Image: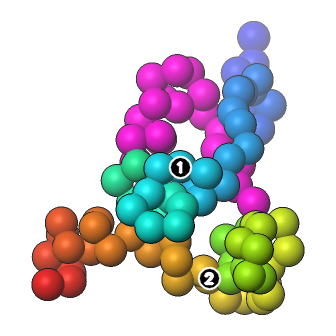
Amino acid sequence: MIEPTLLEQRRAGLLLHPTSLPGSFLGGDIGPEAFRFIDFLADSGCSVWQMLPLGPTHEDGSPYQCLSVNAGNPLLISLDWLVDHDWLG
């Protein structure tokens, strides 16, 4: 029997924007809670984490309509993670 390729294998996952995770400020970011979430997904047998666009948002903060397709949202940068890794003092 031929082994299925990665894209032919059945997988499970979910759609969740990082701002839906717990965070220090207005919403979640790509920091410690995101890494904990990835560990949770792996432990649960999920192999896919689909995200909405990570660009800067309008005042309402909705990730469904970004202001730019080329820019990232600076609010998703985890300052706690940068401090923990001595990149920010």
Q: In this view, does 22 lie above or below 79?
A: above
Q: Nearer the viewer, residue 38 or 8?
A: 38
| Residue 89 inside the magenta-drawn segment | no
Q: In this view, does 10 lie above or below 13?
A: above
Question: What is the span of residues highlighted in magenta in the rendered image?
Answer: 35-52
Q: Which residue does the numbered mark 2 point to in the structure image?
A: 72
Q: In x, y percent, where is residue 78?
A: 38, 69
Q: In x, y percent, where is residue 34?
A: 46, 51
Quadrant housing the N terminus: top right
**Residue drawn where x is 77% and y is 82% of the image:** 58
Q: In x, y percent, where is residue 68?
A: 78, 88
Q: In this view, does 67 lie above or below 25?
A: below
Amino acid type at image mark 2: Gly
Q: Which residue does the numbered mark 1 point to in the structure image?
A: 21
Q: Residues within 10 Å of mark 2 (few under 14, many from 20)?
A: some
Q: Is residue 37 visible?
A: yes
Quadrant housing the C terminus: bottom left
User: Is residue 30 toward the left or the right of residue 59 in the image?
Assistant: left
User: Is residue 65 toward the left or the right of residue 60 in the image?
Assistant: right
